[in-house]
Image (tube, rainbow, N blue to C red):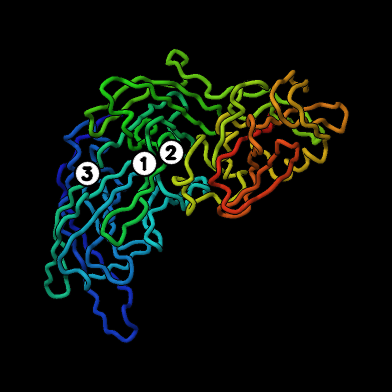
Amino acid sequence: MKKKVFIYALIIIGTITLTSCSKDDNSNTRQRDLKFNIVVNNTSVNETKAVKTGWENGDKIFVFFSERSYCDEFATLTFDGSKWNGAVEGYSCLDPDDLNSGTMYAVYIPFGNAAPDWYGRFIGSSHMNPALDDIPIFTFYLKDVSGSTYSVETEGEIATLNGTLNMSLPNDFVYFYLCKSGEKYNQNEKYRLSVEGIKPIAIKEFNETEDFDQHEQDAGQAMWGYKYGDGIAFAGIMDDSWKTDTPVEHTFILFSDGEPAISKTFTKTLKGEIHPSIKLKDPSDPSNGWLQAVPAPTYTLMGDGKKWADWYLGSSDLNDDCYGYIFRWGDIVPGGSPTSYISDYAVNSNLTGDYALFDVARAYLGANWRMPSKSELETLYSSCTTELKSSGVVTSGSFNKKGLVFTSNFTPNNSILLRLDGDAIMTCFWSSTNEAKRDAYYAQLTSAGAYSVVCGSDTKKTPRAIRPIFIGE
């Protein structure tokens, strides 16, 4: 990635004409023209290998003010390649009459066309895949950490906003970069990166205490990659496991939609680095040591006409000590805690079509695999006889783990084992079928041999196993 020379201070001079939100239908609110005279500094650029070394055409900074009325008031500053231009865009109700002097707060989000919605939440927009619209953008950001003072000078009907913004990258952000290789690694909405000990972060909204709230997911959850320069950029906040005196092993998983996920373990410490930047070697080059993250299971054609995996995602055979990984519905990294699940933005659609990006079987195994639907979970049961066993033989081989054997009622009489999770009373695995914003369908089997397809309340936050279906040739 070519390094740019940062324009350390840029004077913003722009004129906009504003139509204010009406504070009172009977008031005679006057309209003024507003000019901006603001200096923008990037105070992070000299600290380390800062991810943002220069402003680019189309960059936007959103500026909020301590003097706010009943509606959201913010200005949008857009860089045109040589200067910044001020405007009141989207859902803003900024009125020059509300501005005299005070403190302004600013944030810059580089990717995803993030902008405040009607509720003041920062969400993405204008994606090629609409499934990614209206959800937070997990990437790095710059903000004016403590706010900066501003003043307004009025001359006639012209108000000039004066001040200086000091934009900086919050501490502990880690920036990962993957250079283009052939046709790979230079496309939006395709790549995600899970890094052990790195937490995806997204700006949520400007709050009542005059700060920017953020979404923070569990360490290791997947960061979306965004096209930047001649490659793909990822970013997140490191936890303390990266700040040790000696290097520690961390596992990386790279997801490329439609292709099997690959992984590699790195040994590294980032102690003492404020804003570290890590350039990854080409994962498609076998000499760089990336391997398939999860082995593809074998599969068996059952009486419902579907090719069911012979074990859960995350196992390697019928008798693996691990019965499978468990995932929250719509997540592609196992084991996340419910407290970091973004329920306000949870996927409210079946995990098919545009939303297949959130199908964990596809994410790990590629486009030849997917999660089963609710009806497929039901049809598997209705087309088979079932028997609880602790050992025996199914079509793919012998087993010595307790579970429910499904034997097809049709010719051939193929069979698969749905294992129980050790001595657990009940084991559950997801369907791809959505019920509501926080609910989805899943199958459950009990240690007594019962099987059912259910949908409980607020279920998407609960980690469950995945039993994939093979849809390739």
Please state, as top left, top right, bottom left or bottom right, where the C terminus lies in the image: top right
Q: Residues within 10 Å of mark 1 (few under 14, many from 20)?
A: many
User: SS at mark 2?
Assistant: strand
Location of residue 168 by image quarter: top left
Q: Earlier in the sequence, mark 2 or mark 1?
A: 1
Amino acid type of the residue that numbered disc 3 sits on in the rendered structure: Ser
- Alpha-carbon distance for marks 3 and 2? 22 Å
Name which of mark 3 and mark 2 comes first in the sequence: 3
Q: Write down the residue under mark 1.
A: 139
168 lies above or below 191? below
Quadrant in the picture for residue 159:
bottom left
Mark-to-mark CA distance, 2 and 1: 7 Å
Q: Pointer 2: what residue?
A: 224
Q: Which residue is mark 3?
A: 168
Please say if the residues under marks 1 and 3 sit with CB atoms less than 8 Å apart.
no
Q: SS at mark 3?
A: strand
Q: Nearer the viewer, residue 224 or 251?
A: 251
Q: Residue 229 sits in which quadrant? A: top left
Q: From the viewer's perspective, is 447 left or right of 163?
A: right
* Residue 206 position (above or below residue 248): below
The answer to whether mark 3 and mark 2 are in CB contact below 8 A is: no
Residue 418 x/y as whole percent: 71, 31
| CB within 8 Å, label 2 to label 1 | yes
